Image: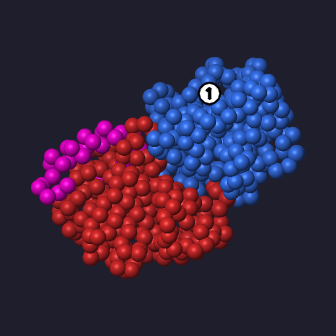
């Protein structure tokens, strides 16, 4: 299986020259199975770019099928969904997995963001593509040869945040975002979930040295420690802070890469970059 | 009077190499008149404005935010506006009165759980919401503000800001006034226009006259030019205009400078250059046409 980063920024999109190399669109990762299966992780504004790309193929003809896996329903993970043509062309099929919140089901949340005060779409009923919302559980889901496992890792207010593990044969990709390791139970769960993954994509907007109030995000160091403890092969830092420039991300990679080397770790450290494709 | 542009894009923000010059942030314009700081719309450009305000020697302690409507691209920057976290900051928010939901509730719901972890009650800045309607005029210090109805799904406002130094007309989202009349109801588009009733044609004509009046003699008119002719033909139900429709309004209103605005997310810098050149070639003498870009500053008076 192969992944493609379409949106790697956290919180809010950051257009501009200083953010161009790593990219300024919010969270969206495409995952292509060996047999043509198509998944996407989250639907921030990166989904708009991804959707335009898909329109050049089967989706433009109303013959596309996409499984969308949503970690949680904060803006930077869902607001891109209603815009691209793929969701408006009849015949396309969307299957959307994600968590219900105590404030309402996933479907209600998406319907809410499309209500006429916020969107000219006037609600989910007017999305042209066939769409099915499925509450995510810890039961594995099979899409072709891909096995999707999901795990609720933490909770912010009424919103649970889910992590995903996608496996094809022996290969495994793990996606953990917006989590806060506020206690050891969550940490142990995450370590178990990411165990021996070939590739871990983990939100890491700030370092421990940076004192920012951001509603409790894991830090760059948490992501690295988790990757080491889970014996992950390759870690992609993700959900970059809106103020993080390309130059700063370069420096960050050099700094933490050197630290890993000095300790003799073989973990490959990288930062998620829009437009980059990776074979898992 | 100083006008600074922080966001020009419509529909959704785009981060791409071919939009660097005109910018990928959604709509936000800052107007300074004397001590007054007025913000037009709260798109992602508002985050950059907030950072700039906080970097001033004496950040303004009072701000006015005029919202044309609450579609995502016009409010998505609001929670990332740094002055919200400042105790000595008061923000007066103006927007359209609706029977279905108060302006405050619309904003509060957008940025509270499960969409974001914010609560308007917890902000350090003091927020005051003012619900207004089309046809209303009021003063913000020395600035006279007029609101008119734009032709956009679920209704939207357009604003005129008038000072002794200059006049700005802000019309970021409007369709033309000949085919589709937008109101509360969703427009069903099957590929051909429904004929308008006499009453609808009358309402469209009045709305157009209201927009012309709003922009009359303006030094600068920011106007929705999201669509190409081809896009308009396919998506008239989204409520956006073309550059040539914007130019026609500018000519009729006797505007000095037309700033094409609310650029389509797909529109590249080079395409915008061509659109501007095409329209400028058709414009009468005395009408300057540009496409609004992030970072542009306009001035009148001292």
Residue range highlighted in magenta = B260-288
Circle 1 residue: A3
The x, y position of residue A232, in whole percent, is 77, 27
Given residues B269 and A98, the one toward you in this image is B269
Residue B170 is at least partly visible in this image: yes
**Residue A45: in magenta span:** no
Q: Colour of chain B?
A: red
Q: Residue at x 79, y 45 (%)?
A: A153
| Chain identifier for the blue-coloured part of the image | A
Q: Residue A193's quadrant in the figure?
A: top right
Given residues A219 and B103, the one toward you in this image is A219
Given residues A166 and A198, the one toward you in this image is A198
Q: Residue at x 65, y 50 (%)?
A: A73
Quadrant showing the C terminus of chain B? bottom left
Q: Secondary structure at mark 1?
A: strand
Q: Residue at x 51, y 74 (%)?
A: B61
């Amino acid at each position: 299986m192969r992944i493609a980063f379409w949106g790697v920024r956290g919180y809010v999109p950051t257009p501009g020259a200083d953010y161009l190399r790593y990219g300024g669109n919010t969270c969206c990762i495409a995952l292509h199975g060996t047999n043509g299966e198509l998944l996407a992780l989250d639907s921030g504004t990166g989904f708009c770019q991804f959707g335009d790309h898909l329109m050049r193929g089967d989706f433009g003809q109303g013959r596309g099928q996409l499984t969308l896996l949503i970690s949680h329903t904060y803006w930077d993970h869902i607001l891109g969904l209603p815009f691209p043509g793929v969701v408006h062309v009849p015949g396309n099929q969307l299957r959307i997995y994600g968590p219900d919140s105590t404030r309402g089901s996933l479907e209600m949340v998406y319907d809410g963001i499309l209500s006429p005060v916020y969107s000219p779409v006037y609600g989910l009923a007017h999305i042209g593509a066939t769409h099915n919302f499925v509450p995510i559980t810890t039961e594995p889901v099979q899409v072709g040869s891909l096995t999707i496992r999901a795990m609720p890792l933490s909770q912010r207010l009424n919103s649970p945040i889910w992590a995903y593990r996608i496996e094809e044969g022996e290969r495994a990709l793990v996606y953990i975002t917006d989590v806060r390791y506020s206690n050891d139970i969550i940490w142990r769960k995450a370590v178990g979930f990411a165990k021996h993954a070939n590739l871990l994509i983990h939100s890491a907007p700030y370092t421990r040295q940076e004192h920012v109030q951001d509603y409790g995000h894991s830090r760059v160091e948490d992501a690295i420690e988790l990757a080491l403890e889970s014996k992950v092969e390759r870690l992609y830092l993700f959900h970059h802070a809106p103020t993080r420039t390309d130059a700063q991300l370069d420096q960050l990679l050099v700094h933490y890469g050197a630290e890993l080397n000095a300790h003799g770790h073989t973990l490959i450290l990288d930062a998620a970059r829009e437009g980059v494709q990776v074979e898992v | 009077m100083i006008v600074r542009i922080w966001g020009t894009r419509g529909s959704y923000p785009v981060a791409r190499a071919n939009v660097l010059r005109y910018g990928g942030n959604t709509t936000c314009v800052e107007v300074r008149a004397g001590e007054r700081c007025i913000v037009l719309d709260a798109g992602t450009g508002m985050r950059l404005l907030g950072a700039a305000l906080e970097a001033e020697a004496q950040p303004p302690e009072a701000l006015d935010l005029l919202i044309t409507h609450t579609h995502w691209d016009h409010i998505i920057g609001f929670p990332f506006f740094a002055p919200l976290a400042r105790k000595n900051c008061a923000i007066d928010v103006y927007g359209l009165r609706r029977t279905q939901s108060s302006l405050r509730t619309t904003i509060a719901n957008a940025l509270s759980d499960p969409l974001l972890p914010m609560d308007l009650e917890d902000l350090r800045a003091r927020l005051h919401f003012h619900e207004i309607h089309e046809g209303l005029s009021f003063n913000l210090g020395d600035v006279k503000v007029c609101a008119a109805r734009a032709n956009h799904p679920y209704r939207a406002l357009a604003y005129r800001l008038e000072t002794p130094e200059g006049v700005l007309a802000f019309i970021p989202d409007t369709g033309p006034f000949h085919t589709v009349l937008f109101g509360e109801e969703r427009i069903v588009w099957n590929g051909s226009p429904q004929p308008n009733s006499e009453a609808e044609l009358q309402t469209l004509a009045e709305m157009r006259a209201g927009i012309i009046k709003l922009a009359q003699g303006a030094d600068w008119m920011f106007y929705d030019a999201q669509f190409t002719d081809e896009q308009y033909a396919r998506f008239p139900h989204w409520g956006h205009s073309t550059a040539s429709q914007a130019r026609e309004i500018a000519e009729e209103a006797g505007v000095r400078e037309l700033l094409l605005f609310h650029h389509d997310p797909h529109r590249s810098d080079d395409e915008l250059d061509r659109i501007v050149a095409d329209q400028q070639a058709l414009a009468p003498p005395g009408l300057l046409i540009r496409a609004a870009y992030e970072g542009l500053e306009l001035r009148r008076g001292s």
